Image: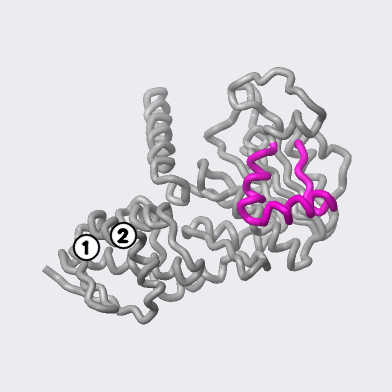
Amino acid sequence: MSEATISFTDHDLLRTLFGAGDQYLRQVRDSVGIDVVIRGDELRLHGEADNIQRGLRVFQELQQIIERTGRLDPWEVEHVLSGSNGDGVVPPAGDAAEDDAHASIDLFEKAKRVVPRTKGQAEYVRTIAENDLVFSTGPAGCGKTFLAVAMAVNALRSEQVRKIVLVRPAVEAGEKLGFLPGDMIAKVNPYLRPLLDSLNDILDFEQVKRYMARDVIEIVPLAFMRGRTLNSTFIILDEAQNTTLTQMKMFLTRMGQESKIVVTGDTTQIDLPVHVTSGLVDAVARLGGIDGVGVVKLTGRDIVRHRLVREVVRAYDDQAGERKSRRK
């Protein structure tokens, strides 16, 4: 049996780390397989040497999250624990952890920041900062749209751009909704709602309304982009796996001077007809080697939604792999 001690000087941090009713403390203890004894401002870990090391890494990462954001959510604890068991990535101490902190996104609002939760997300943020055109692929829940919107808000508020345009193809996911009631905005709203949800998670609702009323933020269907040239604009194309080759070419050529484009999508959830090639898949293969174009592939390890989302994605990926093996 081995033992290690962690000392804390901030009582508020310690309370946040333990969680309500010590729920986080018990969660770490049971998941990692160690005994945790509290002595004043110290945590004493008892257990097998490997488990002790995992426990130290988990508590260190949870402490870093609290220091960066001032809070700790249940899904963050789950994500860190899954990383300690090999399903995700727990950032190590030292230079690598500092690099991730530098990738945090300042929203210039009451010291509010968005912090990448995984190595893949940190790489994604850095790629957006360093390139004018970025393609990001990955499964649901890995932060593709959310982080892109946060980077767009950062660029707007630091006066790198004058406008944000959020774009999405109006493609139904396996269901035919028929003719929707209302004017044009009401008809396309269900398709564009996920982008608005990301925006409302980052900014106050009233601030979003003001930006949209002043046309500083615009949310439009992909079909309405034809013929436009957007200068000094941060443009995000979401669900790009459902674009055709022609649509993707049309969209990418809207890019004006001092503009930035981020294209996101999940190539495992293409809702186009079987005989139609995805514009996202084609663009990544066609443009990936061009200077100034960044390509980031996020994986199941970068999923930061509910723990079960990672398991769902893995189950479907495993089944797809088995089908490919049988066909071969």
Which residue appears at 78% of the width and 54% of the height? Answer: 211
Q: Image height check: is 68 above or below 128? A: below
The residue most toward the front is 21
Circle 1 is placed at which residue position? 51
**Magenta-colored stretch includes residue 17:** no
The residue stretch that appears in magenta: 192-221
Q: How crowded is mark 2: few (under 14 residues within 10 Å), some or many (20 or more)?
A: few
Element on which disc 1 rests: helix
Front in this rendered view, residue 38 or 274? 38
Judged by its main secondary structure, the magenta piece is helix
Image quadrant where one finds the N terminus:
bottom left
Nearest to the eye among marks 1 and 2: give it. Answer: 2
The residue most toward the left is 1
Which residue appears at 50% of the width and 56% of the height? Answer: 120
Sequence-wise, the earlier of marks 1 and 2 is 2
Circle 2 is placed at which residue position? 21
Q: Position of residue 20 (x, y in %)?
A: 35, 60
Q: Which amino acid does label 1 sit on?
A: Asn
